[in-house]
Amino acid sequence: MIDFSARVRVRRLATAALWFTIALTVGIGGTITSAEVGMAYPTWPDINGGSLFSFIYTEMAEEFGLGSVVEHTHRQAGVLTGILVMAAAAAAWFGRGVPRAARLLALAALLATVAQGLLGAFRVLTNSYGGAIVHALGAQFVVVLIVALCHRVDPRWDEPAVPVPATAAAKLRRWSLLGFCLLFVNLFTAASLRHKQGAFAGHLVLALTTAAVLLYAAHLAARDCGASVAARRSGIRMLALLSVQTLLGAGAWTWLLGPLAAASQEQRAQFLLQAALATAHLLVGVLVMANAATLAIQARWRITSEDSA
């Protein structure tokens, strides 16, 4: 009998790292961009001469402004994510019965997390918008690697793949992979736009194209590949996430670029609303990316055509 205890331990650590990455590291990072306080601290690794592990936020806010607190907590969240990914990698490499593929994924996630931290340092030390865009994309890449790790150490991975009609299986593989790749390209246009280096029209066209492809993949997963409960759930979840993301995108455009961008209201309230919409749009986008990765993984490895079953 296979001992799954080590794999379960890796999965728990990887899942914790995933949610900390999305909610804290990416979420706070998105808030920094939305609030335009990315250079609140132009130094690295020190914090304007202070310690990264200082938790006296009120003093920071008084001395350097509220934006410095957001940037400070982002760096602290990055350290926490790094510790969790490091723990998952250690558990994978030193745990008995962990597949070699999972160990390599854990190592890749750790190296990507380290590279992401160095990219953040490069962005700060050079005040580079290009570095900021690559740093934003790097966070999504880390999320995808952790998602893949979570799946590979799941004990259910060793269960037989679910047979579905051959045509449906092939379609789901093609469309889920295409949607995943388009999503990454679209994230580049989104990151460029958020850092004021891109055009809204390009992002809009690519976003609509990506959404259409992902919706079709979700439709295939929920209807034609419904024999796979996991794929069906991923398809339904994708439909829900894309619906929310579309509404947030419309709201962000309306308040940031559209008719209400210059609405007559208190300036601080307007800024907070715009920042909240932009950050929420980013966060749901990360969830879409995680779910798109899940759907592509399930289509490739967790279903099989009935002809070959």
Image (spheres, rainbow, N blue to C red):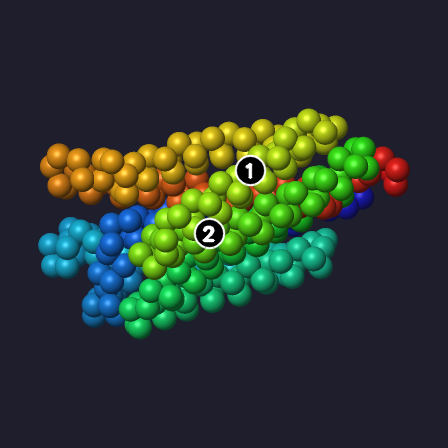
- Note whether 158 is above or below 239 in the view shown: below
Residue at disc 2, secondary structure: helix
**Spatial distance from mark 1 to mark 2, Cα to Cα?**
15 Å
State the image coordinates of residue 258 (x, y, percent, origin top left).
28, 39
Residue found 65% across the figure and 28% down from its top? 222
Q: Is residue 162 visible?
A: no
Q: Amino acid at mark 1?
A: Ala
Left or right: 148 as drawn, with respect to 160:
left
Q: Nearer the viewer, residue 263 or 303?
A: 263
> Residue, x 51% and y 54% (percent of image)?
185
Question: Neighbour class for label 1 at 10 Å: few (<14), some, many (≥20)?
Answer: some
Q: Quadrant of residue 271?
A: top left
Image location of residue 194, percent across then percent down: 34, 52
Mark 1 or 2, closer to the camera:
1
Q: Is residue 111 above or below residue 281?
A: below
**Relative to 177, is 64 above or below?**
below
Residue 244 pos. (x, y %): 44, 32
Q: Which image quarter holds the N terminus? A: top right
Please name the residue that numbered disc 1 is placed on: 212
Q: Viewer-proximal residue, 143 or 232?
A: 232
SS class, disc 1: helix
The residue pinned by badge 2 equals: 187
Quadrant hosting residue 162: top right
Would you identify the image quadrant in which residue 197 lies? Answer: bottom left
Residue in the foreground of this view, choosing between 109 and 137: 137
| Amino acid type of the residue tagged 2 in the rendering | Leu
Density class for disc 2 (Cα within 10 Å; few <14, some 14-19, many ≥20) is: many
Q: In the image, residue 161 lies at what x, y percent?
A: 78, 39
Q: Which badge, 1 or 2, comes first in the chain's sequence?
A: 2
Is residue 305 at all visible to an observer of this figure? yes
Which quadrant does the C terminus fall into? top right
